[in-house]
Image (tube, rainbow, N blue to C red):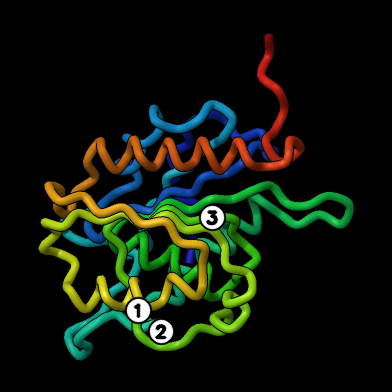
Amino acid sequence: MNVEKAAVWSRPDDGVAPLVVLLHGRGGTEQDLTRLFPFLPDDVVAVSLRGLLPRPDGFSWFSVGLDAREATAEHVAPAADAVLAWIADHAPTGETAPRRAVAVVGYSQGGAVAVHMMRRAPLALDTLVLIAALLGTGDEPGDDELLDVRPPVYWMRGLRDEAITLMDVQRVAYFLPPHSRLTTAEHPLLGHDLSDTFLAATGAYLARWVEALPRPSRGPEPDA
């Protein structure tokens, strides 16, 4: 599956700066998370990708189907692998230098893809930001390794979210603490939406993440 068909970049990619990959929710498009661009730190480059499956209202990353009650790891795996392959092309692991730093921001269904990317390739990503995310049932091949790797994850959700079920929330809340260094934020007045509150918090988190990176991973210094 190809996720290169429609990608919107925050600026031209220099191949060095920390890469922030944005994954929209079900029925969204690659334009949805471009609203995050103004909130991002200057020394990252971000790309918003389009989901793989067309729908009447936009695109999705995976489809559960009428015969399944909820998403499973097998439903999510093709999208997770497609985005991981795209990242491998844009953040290759060199023989003489470490790969560039990579963060993934996933909203709703895109959040599920982000988590399963981490579960399938624990060393391929440096951090996740999850907004109103869910999680597929079943095991993934990297789950045991994640217990040791434990990448930082920032998980936000609105307490008025009626699109994410209590079971979805409980599944995420059960899985993430032992498998990541988790920070959570719950917003009592927000629902299942990409509010400026979520976007600003994402930008602030990524600014702190970039600031903590070793200098070579932060890309070239801006011109004076």
Q: How many other residues sit within 10 Å of disc 3, few (<14), some (14-19) or many (≥20)?
A: many
Q: Is residue 199 left or right of residue 150?
A: left
Circle 1: residue type: Gly
Residue drawn at (51%, 73%), measured in percent from left and top?
A: 179
Mark 3, secondary structure of its residue: strand
The residue tagged 1 is 136
Say whether marks 1 and 3 touch (CB < 8 Å): no
Circle 3: residue type: Thr
Measured along the vertical axis of the image, is residue 212 above or below residue 186? above
The residue tagged 3 is 127
Give residue 126's quadrant in the image.
Answer: bottom right
Measured along the vertical axis of the image, is residue 150 above or below residue 44? below
Mark closer to the chain start, 2 or 1: 2
Q: Is residue 179 left or right of residue 172?
A: right
Q: Nearer the viewer, residue 110 or 197?
A: 197
Residue drawn at (35%, 60%), measured in percent from left and top?
A: 110
Mark closer to the chain start, 2 or 3: 2
Q: CA distance from mark 1 to mark 3?
A: 19 Å
State which quarter of the image contains the C terminus.
Answer: top right
Mark 1, secondary structure of its residue: loop
The residue tagged 2 is 74
